[in-house]
Amino acid sequence: METIIKNILDELLVKLGIDFSSIQVIEEDENEYYVNIDSDQAKDLIGRHGATLQALQVLLITIIKRKSDVTCSLITDVDGYRKKQIENVKALAERKVNFLRNSKKPQSLNPMSPFFRRVVHTHLNSDQFADIETESTGNGNRRKVVLKLRRA
């Protein structure tokens, strides 16, 4: 599958006229892949607030599904941009958890995309955070994650 993903993305980037030096595809779990593109045109691939990168990811998943009839999960990245964002969101969530544990008052994170809300929910769903409950609230682009202490 790694070769299929790499070949499809390579062809797509060439057709888009995007220069890149390499594409790394790493299988992180069964049918879950992390794809990183090294490019001098990172800004063009990322777009405003990562919108172009998100669109590229959706397009890549769609093409893979049609060409291989396999459904997979991808995180598409450029020069580690998304990986840094993920680490920043996890660190923010942990700071909010520490404040919550001290204050005992629910904490809200700023509204974020479904992708980053999932990152928070998944990250805080480990034994280290067994005392924490997460919940998404709000509608549309105002949807956010609220952290609460889990009731005993």
Image (tube, grey):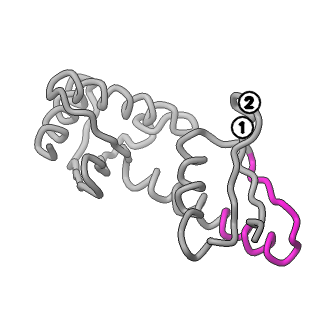
Residue at 59% x, 54% y is: 121
**Observer-nearest residue: 64 or 24?**
64
Q: Position of residue 85 (x, y in %)?
A: 53, 55
- The residue identified by callout 1 is 143
Q: Position of residue 120 (x, y in %)?
A: 59, 56
Tell me the quarter of the image containing the N terminus: top left
Residue at 69% x, 31% y is: 141
Q: Residue placed farthest to the front in the image? A: 152
Residue 120 drawn in magenta:
no
Residue at 29% x, 47% y is: 37
Q: Position of residue 109 (x, y in %)?
A: 74, 53
Residue at 71% x, 70% y is: 95
Residue 91 lies left or right of residue 50; in this view the side is: right
Q: Position of residue 130 (x, y in %)?
A: 62, 71
Tell me the quarter of the image containing the C terminus: bottom right
- Magenta span: predominant SS is helix
Residue type, label 1: Arg
Residue type, label 2: Asn
Residue 145 lies left or right of residue 72; in this view the side is: right
- The residue identified by callout 2 is 139
Occupied quadrant, residue 106:
bottom right
Label 1 – label 2 distance at C-alpha: 5 Å
Tell me the element at label 2: loop
Occupied quadrant, residue 123:
bottom right
Specify start and end residues of the magenta stretch as a single range: 93-110
Label 1 with label 2: CB-CB less than 8 Å: yes
Task: Classify 30 as above or below 13.
Answer: below
Task: Classify 57 as above or below 132.
Answer: above
